[in-house]
Image: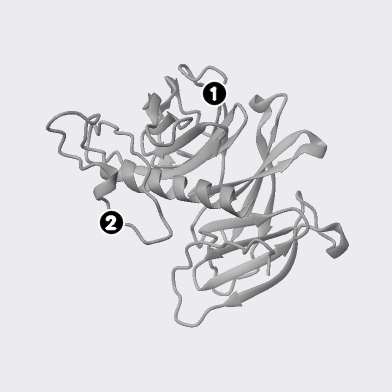
Amino acid sequence: MARGRTRVILLAVTISTLLSGALYGVPAAAGDPNPPVSTYATTPNMEALGWEPRENPSSSIINSDLAFWGDRAYQGTYDGFQIIDISNPEDPQEVLDYNQCSGDQGDLVVWNNILVRSWNSGAGATATCDGQNIVLPLPDTSWEGLHVFDISNELNPALVASVNLQCGSHTATGVPDLANNRLLIYNSGSSSTCPQIDIVQIPLANPAAAALLRVESNGRTSPAQSCHDTGVILGDVMRAACAGGNGFTTWSLDPADGGSLENPAQLYSTVVPGVTIGHSAGFTWDGK
C-alpha cells in the first residue's frame, strides 16, 4: 500500500508543478521550448512522469488547485478548471479546458460527477458563470462562495448550484457523509472577518439543492483569526483542523468526543509564536 500511495502523491506534485511550468507551452514536438521531463531537477524520492500543456489566454489566468477522481485530474484555474485524462501518467491528455467561470481562486473538490469550485472575491451583477448571470443575494451587492457543477458530461459541465457565503471561498475541503447520502464541504473564507469554517451540504442525489448547513467558529476571535485551509482525516482518527492567522484550531468528528461530521466538537486552538499567516493544516496518516 505504501508504494501505491507514494506514486499517487508523486503524480499530484508532478502534474501541479509541470502544468504551471507549461502554461506558455505547446504539446511536445520538434523544436518544443519545454524540456522533456527527464531534464527536470527532482529530489531522490520523486520521479517526473509527464506534463500536459495549457494555453494561457492572459497573464492573470493562473492555476490554483488540484483534485483527483479515478483516472482524471482536475486543475483549478482562475477562469474555471481543466479536466485531464491521467490514465497514462507519462502522457496526460486534456479532456476539457473549461473557462466560463472567471471568479478568482478556483480551488476544487470532486466527488464522482460533482465538482465544487471556490469563488473568492465579491462578484457584481454583470459577472457570469457557465453563461448564467451571478444572482446577487439581496440586499448584498455582490456574490462570493461556492459553485457546484454536474460534470457527468465532461465536454459540457453544467452549473447546478451557487452557494453564497459571508466571506466567499478561498479553499474548500470535501468530507463524504455517505450515511446521509451527501457530500459536506468545509469551507475556509480566509478572512479575519469570518473566524470560522462554513459547512455546506450537497445531496448526492440532488446537487442542485446544495446549501449552507452551519457555521463553526474556530474559537480564535480575540483578535479574530481566519481559517485559510482545512485538513480532514476520517477512518479511525476523525479529526479536522484549520490553519490561518496566528495558529490553528482542531476539532473532533468522533461521536465519542461529542462531535460529528455535521457538528465538529472543538478540541483546542493553538497560537504558534512568530506565525502571522497560517496557511495549511494536515495530518500524518495515523493522525498523531
**Callouts 1 and 2 close, C-beta under 8 Å:** no
Amino acid type of the residue that numbered disc 2 sits on in the rendered structure? Ala
SS at circle 2: loop
* Label number found at residue 255: none
Does the image show residue 138? no
Q: Nearer the viewer, mark 1 or mark 2?
A: 2
- Left or right position of 67 against 219: left
Residue at 76% from the left image edge and 50% from the top image edge? 261
Q: Position of residue 195 (x, y in %)?
A: 58, 62
The type of residue carrying mark 1 is: Ile
At horizontal 68% and vertical 65% (from top left) the residue drawn is 287
Tag on residue 41?
2
114 and 68: which is toward the camera: 68
- Relative vertical location of residue 63 with respect to residue 131 in this rendering, above or below: below
Q: Quadrant of the C terminus?
A: bottom right
Picture coordinates of residue 177 (x, y %)? 75, 41
Figure check: 209 above or below 16: above
Q: Residues within 10 Å of mark 2 (few under 14, many from 20)?
A: few
Q: Which residue is mark 1?
A: 151
Is 249 placed left or right of 124 in the picture? right
Please state the horizontal and vertical placement of residue 43, each as a whole percent of the image.
Answer: 36, 61
